[in-house]
Image: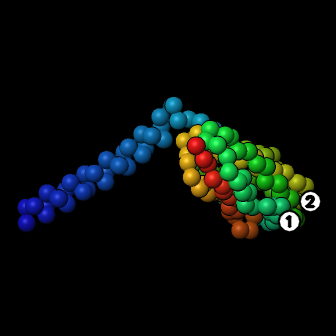
Amino acid sequence: MVKWLVLGIGVIYLGCGTVEDEQRVEATPSLADTTARYVRREERAVATPLDTGSTLAFTDTDFRFGRVRAGTTVRHHFTFTNEGPAQLRIGAVASSCGCTVSRYPTEAIDSGASGSVEVTFRTSATLGHQHRAVVLHANTTPPQTTLYLSGEVVP
């Protein structure tokens, strides 16, 4: 019985330590790159509801970059058009990892106008098949659009 109690307390202790470690990693100044700024920006955007009414149409949502050598920077512009009656406002763009960084228009995009989201994938710390997701949060229906980069990183 004591063995199970000690084991349970140990699991709870380790679980709590993991949460603290994750919070420390996010607050570390050395990791405050552009991706971290987008994640913080996303939290503010989600808390503030956006007017809906825009329709976002991408020319492609899945970019396959083929085979590249490790250390190569892959960059792709996902082009879109606002096909809805309202102005399009992108609240945030969040990536699936710190090696993927995005740039997007912060100003409102009129109905019928086009724009692009630039996604940059740094391959220096990866090998093998890669599939990266970038989620765009906007005043659209549906409110999230997922863009993908995929390919293979070789030594």
Where does the image place residue 16, in percent across and percent down from the top left?
31, 51
Q: Can you say whether 21 is above or below 145 in the image?
A: above
Identify the residue at image location x=47%, y=34%: 28
* Circle 1: element type: loop
Q: Amino acid at mark 1?
A: Gly
Q: Amino acid at mark 2?
A: Gly
Visible residue check, residue 124: yes
Earlier-in-chain disc, 1 versus 2: 1
Distance, label 1 to label 2, CA atoms, is 7 Å
Residue ID for mark 1: 84
Where does the image place residue 38, in percent across and percent down from the top left?
63, 45
Identify the residue at image location x=31%, y=47%: 17
Identify the residue at image location x=20%, y=54%: 10
Which quarter of the figure has residue 56?
bottom right
**Extreme-top residue of the structure:** 30
**Extreme-front residue of the structure:** 155
Q: Can you say whether 30 is above or below 16 in the image?
A: above
Visible residue check, residue 104: no
Q: How is the image coloured?
A: rainbow
How packed mark 1 is, by other alpha carbons closer than 10 Å (few <14, some 14-19, many 20 or more), is some
How packed mark 2 is, by other alpha carbons closer than 10 Å (few <14, some 14-19, many 20 or more), is some
**Nearest the eye: 22 or 50:** 22
* Circle 2: element type: loop
Where does the image place residue 12, in percent across and percent down from the top left?
25, 56
Q: Quadrant of the C terminus?
A: top right
Identify the residue at image location x=70%, y=54%: 66
**Nearest the eye: 152 or 49:** 152
Residue ID for mark 2: 112
